[in-house]
Amino acid sequence: MSGNDPARLGSPAFLPADLYGSAAAALAERQRYAPHFWHPVAAVDALPPGHGLALELLDLPVLLTHPPGEQPRAYLNRCPHRGVALLEPAAASRACRRLVCPYHGWTYGLDGQLLAAARESDFLEPFQRQDWPLQPLDCAVMGPLIWVAIGSDPLPLEQQLDLVLAEAGERFGTPRQLLAQTTLELACNWKIAHDNTLDDYHVAIAHPQTLHRYQGPVRDYRHALSPHGSLLATPMADGEFLTFGLAPWTHLLLWPDGRLAVISFPPLSLERCRMDLWLLGEPSQAPMAPAWLESMLTFLEEDRRLVESAQRGYASGLRPGPPHRLERRLLQQQQLYDTLMGLRQQDPAHRHGSSTPSPH
């Protein structure tokens, strides 16, 4: 280590490049980092009462239900008998009064309780329906989104969203409809995609005709940080445009007119991640959704080229350069990652050691 090394001097520094290509780090992220947080999995209006929705979250089969008169719920999407999915993953929810396993016909209510099993009198041991509910996951509604936690002891959702609640408040809580959504695959580690979306240093240079037009001159940038999130606020004619970065890999973009974009980068492999984009707004804003989606995808395509190039650069043995003051949001998230992954407490040669898997 050289005498002017930032790490030696205690100056802020980016995470080392080897973390972006380490299988051991990816395993620790799945076991230690991701279970610490809540994950937005659906828009509230996309799961009406009496509906179910199956999806995957970090390779876990997840089933959302909305019992009439109650809040949405989440379960592992597997029949407790032999593990078969009760619903197949789909882009949209489906109306269902009950859930029937296609393997042996075990039938569940939307509250996760077993209603009936085929030929119940023929089990080899005494059979009680109440002994076989679906395995629940923590589920909450905040703002216009349904959030699910896969860990047994997640951070309180109010703490994870503290900056959003403090800065957006009622604007975030306004009911909205899902106006458009799309999913793309990126050829990069999720951390590169997440880093990029937190990086305010590149916007004016890489997006002069797209995102930069929303965010305006760098001199007008306002930043705020909390233990688990960050904010870039920029003025628009009718209010502030707010861009929140949230651990583990989510971004909320809130326009003064109430439109909300949700961008997430869940990992698929060491060198690939998914980009989920949801656009939410009031029913009156539906006619503008196609143009809005096209605008978002234009600057996200500009970012795709950058992050996929950065992936190749990181894989070549890059030592990241010095942080800029406009990368403070990126540093905040990387320092949180560092802390929760226990990197500072471990010898560098063993910083990606194993941890106890989540019980889910």
Image (cartoon, rainbow, N blue to C red):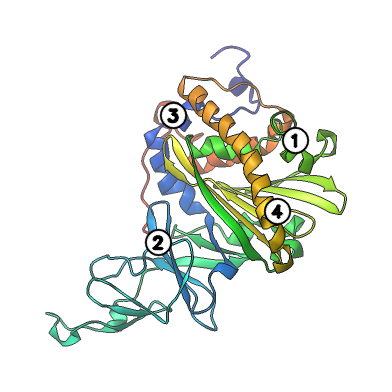
- Residue 164 appears in which quarter of the rendering? bottom right
**Dot in front, 1 or 2:** 1
Distance from Cα at disc 4 to Cα at disc 2: 32 Å
**Dot in front, 4 or 3:** 4
Question: Could you say where residue 166 lies in the image, as x and y percent from the top left?
Answer: 74, 57
Could you tell whether 319 is left or right of 270 in the image?
right
Could you tell whether 353 is left or right of 154 in the image?
left
Identify which residue is drawn at 53% across, 37% down.
Answer: 191
- Residue 303 appears in which quarter of the rendering? top right
Distance from Cα at disc 4 to Cα at disc 1: 29 Å
Question: Could you say where residue 174 lies in the image, as x and y percent from the top left?
Answer: 72, 67
Q: Residues within 10 Å of mark 4 (few under 14, many from 20)?
A: many
Sequence-wise, the earlier of marks 1 and 2 is: 2
Vertical comparison of 269 with 31: above or below: above
* Farthest residue, direction top: 2
**Dot in front, 4 or 2:** 2
Residue with the mark numbered 3: 347
Element type where label 1 sits in the image = loop
Q: Which mark is residue 163?
A: 4
Distance from Cα at disc 3 to Cα at disc 2: 42 Å
Amino acid type at circle 4 is Leu
Amino acid type at circle 2 is Pro
Amino acid type at circle 1 is Gln
Question: Could you say where residue 102 lies in the image, as x and y percent from the top left?
Answer: 27, 72
Q: Which mark is residue 89?
A: 2
Tell whether label 3 touches label 4 (CB within 8 Å): no
Residue with the mark numbered 1: 209
Identify which residue is drawn at 75% across, 62% down.
Answer: 171
